[in-house]
């Protein structure tokens, strides 16, 4: 009896450890659920940095029902092992998955960003004195997400910039936010939270102001998350904003190239002059006529008849010799003139000495 109980005990222990050996995320919380909101919390993965504020049904990875008291639980085993950005958000009653909107600030603020993986355990509590779903929320269970909460306090008020009437005040406010985000990025102990801050910086507006800051952060990502999709996204943005490297050619090298060009031009000009000079023409004619002068009198006579267009039979009749003898002389003429056919012989017609 005792051995059987022992085996049962060990089986239960094995089942306990086996059930806990698989990673499982667990996110619970309590939000403020007004009548205009659907009683659901949607969790969407930010697959690329450009998706940070994009609401799309393609990005949804989990949905939790919100109870009447505002409580909800998101849990499962389908998240990646590495950290990724996720967004929890609610939709208004009139919206569907395909026309969901993200509302920023005020009573309609309906989303938060988190850093999660398949082992994450978090608790999110909204302040019940606020009307918005995630009003003045708190995060428990993760240092990274507490830093994300600090970032949210910095970023979300910036969405009210449009209410500033004076352009000079607007510019100062935007620059203040940029420098606050830079400070947060440089001092943040979490590389992921720092990347979230970077995702909120308008690189197009501020890259030229401090390119070293952005390059250094790119190097930081390469060291912390080599090969990660977010790192690749950021490196592509750097390549877009980084101007091409222009190597200035030294003045002496330019002078050498110009001088070489002038010398080549002078050499070509001299060659053209030599080609057109009478001496060069005479030399060319001499070289072309020289083979013809090697012909015997009979061969020269036959060549003249060939150049008049006569056939072998006509040449034989004119010279009172056999056609075979004509062919023999023609073969010798071809060899001395270095040609292979009557057509090539006709091309030498203009070179026949007068």
Image (tube, helix red, strand yellow):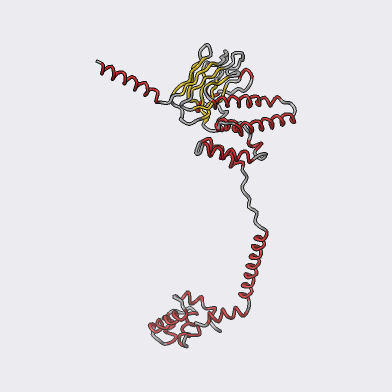
Q: Find residue 113 and report its horizontal and vertical position in percent.
A: 56, 25
Residue at (50% x, 30% y) in the render: 83
Depth check, front residue: 92 or 213: 213
Count of picture labels: 0
Q: Is residue 354 above or below residue 52?
A: below
Instruction: Indicate left or right for 165 with 93 as reference.
Output: right
In the image, residue 61 lies at what x, y percent? 48, 25
Q: x%, y% of residue 321?
A: 40, 86
Measured from the top left, where is residue 282 in percent x and y? 59, 81
In-front residue for pair 81/156: 81
Q: Quadrant of the C terminus?
A: bottom right
Outermost residue toward the front?
A: 2
Say which of 102 and 64 sits in front: 64
Q: Quadrant of residue 174?
A: top right
Q: Residue furthest top?
A: 68
Q: Which residue: 52% across, 19% down?
A: 123
Location of residue 73 with respect to 197 vertically, above or below: above
The quadrant in which the N terminus is found is top left
Residue placed at 56% from the left, 31% from the top?
Answer: 190
């Amino acid at each position: 009896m005792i051995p059987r109980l022992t085996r049962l005990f060990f089986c239960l222990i094995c089942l306990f450890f086996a059930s806990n050996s698989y990673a499982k995320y667990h996110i619970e919380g309590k939000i403020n659920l007004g009548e205009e909101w659907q009683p659901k919390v949607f969790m969407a993965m930010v697959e690329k940095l450009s998706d940070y504020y994009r609401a799309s049904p393609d990005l949804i990875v989990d949905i939790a029902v919100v109870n009447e008291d505002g409580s909800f639980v998101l849990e499962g085993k389908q998240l990646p092992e590495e950290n990724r950005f996720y967004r929890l958000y609610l939709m208004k009653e009139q919206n569907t998955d395909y026309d969901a909107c993200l509302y920023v600030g005020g009573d309609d603020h309906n989303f938060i960003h988190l850093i999660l993986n398949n082992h994450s355990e978090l608790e999110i509590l909204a302040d019940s004195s606020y009307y918005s779903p995630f009003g003045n929320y708190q995060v428990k269970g993760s240092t990274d997400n507490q830093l994300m909460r600090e970032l949210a306090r910095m970023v979300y008020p910036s969405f009210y910039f449009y209410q500033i009437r004076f352009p000079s005040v607007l510019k100062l406010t935007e620059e203040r936010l940029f420098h606050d985000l830079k400070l947060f990025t440089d001092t943040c102990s979490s590389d992921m939270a720092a990347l979230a801050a970077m995702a909120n910086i308008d690189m197009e507006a501020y890259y030229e102001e401090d390119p070293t800051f952005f390059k250094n952060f790119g190097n930081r990502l390469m060291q912390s998350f080599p090969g990660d999709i977010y790192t690749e996204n950021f490196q592509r943005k750097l390549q877009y904003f980084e101007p091409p490297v222009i190597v200035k050619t030294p003045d002496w090298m330019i002078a050498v190239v110009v001088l070489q060009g002038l010398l080549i031009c002078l050499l070509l000009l001299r060659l053209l002059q030599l080609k057109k000079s009478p001496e060069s023409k005479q030399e060319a004619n001499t070289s072309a006529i020289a083979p013809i002068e090697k012909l015997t009198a009979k061969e020269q006579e036959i060549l003249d008849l060939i150049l008049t267009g006569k056939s072998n039979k006509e040449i034989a009749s004119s010279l009172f010799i056999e056609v075979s003898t004509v062919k023999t002389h023609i073969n010798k003429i071809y060899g001395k003139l270095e040609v292979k056919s009557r057509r090539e012989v006709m091309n030498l017609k203009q070179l026949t000495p007068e």
